[in-house]
Image (spheres, rainbow, N blue to C red):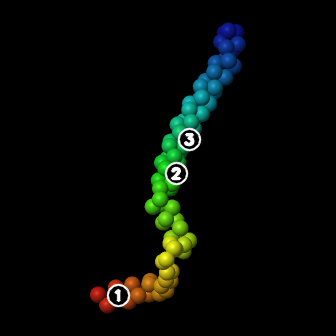
Amino acid sequence: MLITVLYAGPIRSYYDKCELVRHEQAQVTLLRSQHDELKQKLKHAATAEAIERAARRLFYVKSGERLYIVNGIDGWRRDQARATQ
């Protein structure tokens, strides 16, 4: 009986540590997955096409091009949708 009482604390500590290790391993797996995903995003973001798309969103134009800003496209689309109904 005394032996059981003396071993209860270390056994509980052992199982707590095992649970902590499982939790940390799950965290590591999740972080590795996120790391791989971010590496893929970076790989695709570094392409010339992606850089050009990002520049176009900032209204950059190439040398020799003209920038045209068209307003009211949403209203025009609504009018077209009503006209086809």
Tell us which disc is closer to us: 1 or 2.
2
Rendered-image quadrant of the N terminus = top right
Foreground of the two, 50 or 2: 50
Check disc 1 and give the amino acid type.
Gln
Tell us which disc is closer to us: 2 or 3.
2
Q: Which residue is mark 1?
A: 80
Q: Which residue is mark 3?
A: 31
Give the residue displayed 52% in from the left and 65% down from the top. 54
Would residue 37 appear left or right of 14 to someone viewing this image?
left
Is residue 48 shown above or below 64? above
Of callouts 1 and 2, which one flags the residue occurring earlier in the amino acid sequence? Answer: 2
Alpha carbon separation for disc pair 1 and 2: 39 Å
Cβ atoms at labels 2 and 3 below 8 Å apart = no
Question: x%, y% of residue 36?
Answer: 50, 43
The 10 Å Cα crowd at callout 1, few under 14, some 14 to 19, many 20 or more, is: few
Check disc 2 and give the amino acid type.
Leu
Give the residue displayed 51% in from the left and 73% down from the top. 63
Question: x%, y% of residue 12?
Answer: 65, 22
Q: Which residue is mark 2?
A: 42
Check disc 3 and give the amino acid type.
Leu
Foreground of the two, 75 or 67: 67
The 10 Å Cα crowd at callout 3, few under 14, some 14 to 19, many 20 or more, is: few
Mark number displayed over residue 61:
none
Cβ atoms at labels 3 and 1 below 8 Å apart = no
Alpha carbon separation for disc pair 2 and 3: 16 Å
Of callouts 3 and 1, which one flags the residue occurring earlier in the amino acid sequence? Answer: 3
Give the residue displayed 44% in from the left and 84% down from the top. 73
Residue 30 in sight in this render: no
Is residue 5 shown above or below 55? above
